[in-house]
């Protein structure tokens, strides 16, 4: 294993994923991690991440100086390197201006960190502060035009620092540098693979569950679907996946999910609760109120269904690694702006033991497992879909009629985006139905109908997003199909707002 100490960089998770792509398990730990834990848990090396602060800032995250005495190889990246220099008594200069973007890096002293890599290559820089004085124990391995200490190494110990970001794809040979650190310097073994993960997880679920039953709220998204398949592989029909149709799903969604699992041999317990949800939403226009009602009702319905199966000991959830990392970077403001009611957000008073087989995995790993377990691409590559479903995309009061209009418009958006080859390149593509009617003309007749907004965004994690510059002809086809094929809509607009200040969903 490789430990990654997180100082709050937006790239910390990327470092962890890169190490895993190399076939080595990695874990993200907070700067306050206990040094005994670091030294006893079996880590082969430590990577100190970047971070947004200056080492001199009040409250800047600092790691125990003893980390350098553990005898483990250490690679400090950006802030991680500055902190290393600072803790060894060197000097870091505060800069007012950021150096951001590409730079040419030149190796000036050969070291195993740069094995198999040319003398000059392009690196990605993103920093304000710089090292200006190296501690005596360190030497320079490489530089760029603006950064004389671009890469450094302790003269005797396996402690390295890089001012650039090897984990970012813009850095040429970044993977090779990480690989050199992980295999040549830290001497880690390549033994992390999804095939092996499946094998071990299935075995441990089987042992833990025995003859008991496991309940699962299946949403049809990647995470709960993969959980279903993993557990089903372990215990067969003792898994009870419950799929609730809340009436707020997309066109044909429930059928698709049910057929998929039928084909995979998994028995799904289907509940059509659409009428209950729609009547609970009657007259409600406030977005938070909608979310609250849907969240509570989901729990109510799920509990009622679960009771039908008698006493069940276990509840499975699709929690992923990014949700459980204890770190300085998880408290971004945007994560708390909307209340998120998901399947999985079940009440604490239900007395279950939790099974969370994806707890240590990143999304791309979950997708790989899905693929290995035979989940079709339609689910594996599916865009994120909010728990409250189309209720937050019908702006204002949710009615059956409006949901039907939105379903048709939305399926055209997705179809055309897929046909043009954009589906896998974007984070989300969907339609929103506005509670506004505008005047139009069709044939010789005046019309007075709804407006559909089309939202297509790119994003890395949903926390920030940019609207996608779709080709005009794709937009044109979407618009013309919607107004021609969807009764009740005579105008289509394209949402060109970024997040922030907007959000991805409209409610
Ligand atoms: P916003 O609208 O907050 O959305 O910019 C960010 C990402 O989260 C998704 N989203 C949700 N996902 N339950 C979810 O599982 C929810 O209640 C929910 N609300 C928003 C949204 O689709 C986007 O990908």
Image (tube, rainbow, N blue to C red):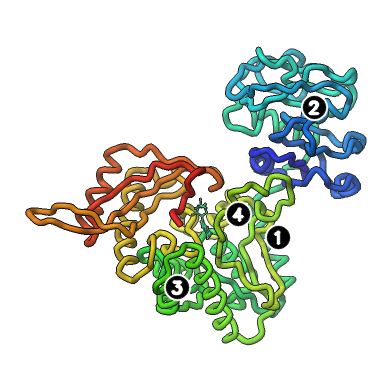
Residue 148, given in percent of the width and then of the height, sits at: 73, 14
Label 3 or label 2, whichever lies nearer to me, is 3
Q: Are marks 3 and 2 in contact (CB under 8 Å)?
A: no
In front: mark 2 or mark 4? Answer: 4
119 or 248: nearer the eye? 248
Q: Is residue 447 left or right of residue 214?
A: left
The tag earlier along the polypeptide, 4 or 3, is: 3
As drawn, is 449 to the left or to the right of 254?
left
Count neighbours of disc 4 (C-alpha within 10 A) and say few if under 14, some if 14 to 19, many if 20 or more.
few
The CB of the residue at mark 1 lies under 8 Å from ligand 1 = no
Q: Which mark is residue 160?
A: 2
Which SS class for mark 4? helix
Q: Is mark 3 within 8 Å of ligand 1?
A: no
Identify the residue position indicated by label 3 in the image.
245
Q: Earlier in the sequence, mark 1 or mark 4?
A: 1
Within 10 angstroms of label 1, few (less than 14), some, or many (20 or more) residues? few
Disc 1 target residue: 200
Marks 1 and 3 close (CB-CB < 8 Å): no
Q: CA distance from mark 3 to mark 2?
A: 54 Å
Sequence-first tag of 1 and 3: 1
What's the mark number on residue 336? Answer: 4
> Vertical placement of 362 versus 354: above or below?
above
């Amino acid at each position: 294993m490789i430990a990654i100490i997180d100082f709050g960089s937006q790239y910390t998770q990327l470092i962890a994923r890169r190490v895993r792509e190399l076939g080595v398990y990695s874990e993200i730990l907070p700067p306050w991690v206990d040094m005994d834990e670091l030294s006893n848990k079996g880590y082969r090396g430590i990577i100190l991440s970047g971070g947004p602060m200056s080492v001199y800032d009040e409250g800047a995250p600092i790691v125990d100086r003893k980390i350098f005495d553990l005898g483990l190889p250490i690679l400090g990246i950006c802030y991680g390197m500055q902190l290393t220099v600072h803790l060894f008594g060197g000097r870091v200069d505060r800069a007012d201006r950021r150096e951001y973007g590409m730079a040419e890096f030149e190796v000036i002293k050969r070291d195993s960190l740069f094995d198999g890599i040319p003398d000059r290559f392009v690196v990605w820089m993103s920093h304000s502060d710089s090292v200006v004085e190296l501690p005596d124990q360190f030497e320079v391995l490489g530089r760029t035009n603006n950064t004389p200490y671009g890469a450094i190494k302790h003269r005797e110990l396996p402690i390295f620092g890089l001012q650039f970001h090897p984990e970012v794809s813009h850095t040429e040979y970044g993977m090779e540098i990480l690989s050199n650190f992980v295999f040549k310097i830290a001497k880690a073994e390549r033994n992390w693979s999804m095939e092996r993960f499946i094998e071990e997880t299935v075995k441990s679920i089987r042992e833990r569950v025995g003859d008991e039953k496991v309940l699962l709220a299946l949403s049809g998204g990647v995470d709960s679907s993969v959980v279903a398949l993993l557990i089903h592989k372990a215990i067969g029909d003792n898994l009870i996946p419950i799929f609730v149709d809340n009436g707020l799903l997309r066109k044909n969604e429930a059928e698709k999910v049910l057929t998929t699992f039928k084909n995979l041999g998994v028995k799904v317990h289907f509940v059509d609760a659409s009428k209950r949800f729609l009547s609970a939403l009657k007259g409600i226009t406030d977005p938070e109120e909608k979310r609250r009602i849907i969240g509570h009702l989901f729990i109510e319905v799920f509990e009622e269904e679960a009771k039908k199966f008698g006493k069940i000991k276990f509840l499975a959830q699709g929690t992923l690694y990014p949700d459980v990392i204890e770190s300085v970077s998880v408290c971004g403001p945007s994560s708390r702006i909307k209340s998120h009611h998901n399947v999985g957000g079940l009440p604490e008073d239900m007395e279950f033991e939790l099974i969370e087989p994806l707890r240590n995995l990143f999304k791309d790993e979950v997708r790989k497992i899905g693929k290995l377990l035979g989940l079709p691409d339609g689910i594996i590559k599916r865009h994120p879909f909010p728990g409250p479903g189309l209720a937050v995309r019908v702006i204002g009061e949710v009615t059956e009629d409006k949901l039907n209009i939105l379903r048709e418009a939305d399926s055209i958006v997705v179809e055309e985006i897929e046909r043009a080859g954009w589906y896998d390149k974007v984070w989300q593509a969907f339609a929103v139905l506005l509670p506004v009617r505008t005047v139009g003309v069709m044939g010789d007749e005046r019309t007075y109908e709804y407006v559909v907004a089309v939202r297509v965004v790119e994003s890395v994690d949903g926390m920030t997003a940019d609207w996608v510059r779709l080709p005009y002809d794709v937009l044109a086809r979407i618009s013309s199909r919607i107004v021609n094929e969807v009764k009740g809509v005579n105008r289509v607009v394209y949402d060109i707002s970024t997040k922030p200040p907007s959000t991805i969903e409209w409610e």
